[in-house]
Amino acid sequence: MRILAIESSCDESAAAILDSDRGLLAHELFSQIELHRIYGGVVPELASRDHVQRLLPLVSRALEVAETAPDRIEGIAYTAGPGLIGALLCGATLARSLAYAWRVPALGVHHLEGHLLAPLLESRPPPFPHVALLVSGGHTMLIEVRGIGEYTVLGETRDDAAGEAFDKSAKLLGLPYPGGPQLAALASDGRAGAYEFPRPMLDRPGLEFSFSGLKTAVLHAVRAFPAQRSPAQLQQARADVAREVQEAIVDTLVAKTLRALEATGLVDLVVAGGVGANRRLRARFDAESARRGLRVYYPRLEFCTDNAAMIAVAGLARLQAGERDGAGIAARARWPLESLQPLAVP
Ligand code: KG4
Ligand code: ZN
């Protein structure tokens, strides 16, 4: 089966072609980051307007790169939620219209299921069951993954997501949106021990996260930068803060994940979502895996952040199992992961 997949849940417009025999044939993406940068965050209305303009050319380009005529496409998957409702509707309407015109089935896919299944595109895919740490701009979750559609949320954040903690701290340090990767870059010049920020929830049992206290710690540190410092000293202080922010987030994510692996008795770990691209996080997990005999699986870097290839993976599995959309377009801003059904065995 060969399918087209469309992603438009937030500020990335993307299209991909996946073939069950030949693998990923094309993946095209346009990031709206520049469009939203001056506002310091994603402006939903601007995101929708841009998706409307970008999506169809991305679909055409993906078909071209995959050397696939539309009549070779046997199904269309699209992100149906969770996400910005206007943005989701852009992808959903296009997907459903193309499916109607091409007389092929369409299926709305859960965005987080896409993130979770992205490592299946790699040469060493994770086995089931495994534990997944899903860390993005909107979510921080530990999930027991027993199979496609078989998810138990073991713990999640009570307030800010890990990506949000990166982004908000970066903003306080004067870095442009989205600050996660920029904060990580600045952190590499930081000195260990110059600051000490809290590791929230580490002292408590359980698998929940809380990152909202971190931005208060950063705010206090930034306010305490003495005005009479030289530009070089100020830059060093910013790097020191960035380093400690990253350490605090990474320490917390690693400790809780190890706890989840211990609690479930599993040794296979998937790290997915935008923050999964963080080098320090990967280095820490790689060190722990060597020490504890764990196996860690990551999507390739470009499939950590939002993309259509991951939507294609989830969509292909479900379309092949015979799942199809009902009559209506089922885009939804909120959609609990645990409400998904296990993949039907055809
Ligand atoms: O998965 P994603 O593209 O979008 C959501 O579904 O939320 O994740 C985006 C988040 C942003 O908060 C971004 O700052 C963060 O992932 N991020 C990073 C890195 N790359 C992306 N955070 C820390 N270090 C990185 N290298
Ligand atoms: Zn995402």
Image: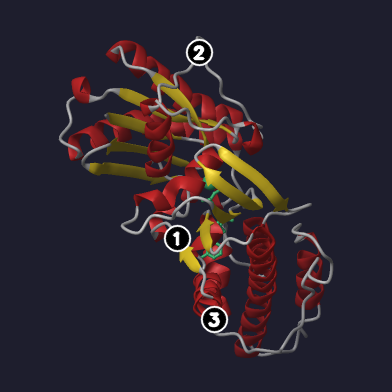
129 and 132: which is toward the camera = 129
Q: Is residue 26 left or right of residue 225?
A: left
**317 shown above or below 152:** above
**Mark 1–mark 2 distance (CA, rounded to whole Å):** 33 Å
**194 shown above or below 342:** below
**Disc 2 crowd, CA 10 A, few/some/many (<14, 14-19, 20+):** few
Q: Earlier along the polypeptide chain: callout 1 or callout 2?
A: 1
- Residue at x-position 42% and y-position 53%: 119
**Residue 326 got which mark?**
2
Which dot, 3 or 2, sits closer to the camera?
Answer: 3
Where is residue 263? Give x, y as percent.
69, 61
**Residue 291 got which mark?**
3
Q: Earlier along the polypeptide chain: callout 1 or callout 3?
A: 3
**328 shown above or below 14:** above
Q: Quadrant of residue 309?
A: top left
Q: Quadrant of the C terminus?
A: top left
Q: Which residue is mark 1?
A: 298
**Disc 3 crowd, CA 10 A, few/some/many (<14, 14-19, 20+):** few
Q: Earlier along the polypeptide chain: callout 3 or callout 2?
A: 3
Contact between marks 1 and 3 (CB within 8 A): the answer is no
Q: Amino acid at mark 2?
A: Gly
125 and 85: which is toward the camera = 125
**Residue 309 got which mark?**
none
